[in-house]
Image (spheres, grey):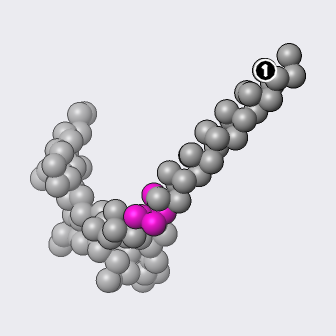
Amino acid sequence: MLSLMRNDLLHSHKQLLKNLEIFRDFLRKAPMIFSNFTLAVCNPMVNPLNNRFMDGQGYEYDETGNLTRDAQGRRFIYDGENKQVEVRDASICWKVLL
């Protein structure tokens, strides 16, 4: 019985070391893997004078004040009544169903 427990423990320890080496390898490669991504602003600063996000954070507005592009590059489309009807990503387009 003790030999079975010892074998299980040894196997678990070897698996843990193998997983640790895989993780270390990932961390060594992480800067190369994630270098093509742009950082989105998670907590953008708001201009208290016009209640819009401050310039330079990747947000754009149309002349009526609708948000037309966010920091992640998504585009927002509005109808004639300024209701959002579509969200466009680089590869995906979502329609808003009313």
Q: Does the magenta-highlighted stretch encompass residue 27?
A: yes
Numbered disc 1: secondary structure = helix
Q: Could you tell me residue 67's position as x and y percent?
A: 27, 64
Q: Residue at x 70, y 41 (%)?
A: 13
Q: Residue at x 64, y 41 (%)?
A: 14
Q: Which residues are magenta?
A: 26-30
The reply, left or right, for residue 18 in relation to residue 41 is right
Q: Where the N terminus falls, by quadrant?
A: top right
Q: Does the magenta-highlighted stretch encompass residue 80?
A: no
Q: Could you tell me residue 7's position as x and y percent?
A: 74, 28
Q: Could you tell me residue 50's position as x and y percent?
A: 38, 78
Q: Residue at x 20, y 58 (%)?
A: 75
Q: Amino acid at mark 1?
A: Leu
Residue reaching furthest right?
2
Main secondary structure found in the magenta portion: helix
Residue 83 lies, with reference to residue 56, above or below; the image says above
Q: Is residue 14 visible?
A: yes
The reply, left or right, for residue 54 in relation to residue 20 is left
Q: Could you tell me residue 11's position as x and y percent?
A: 67, 33
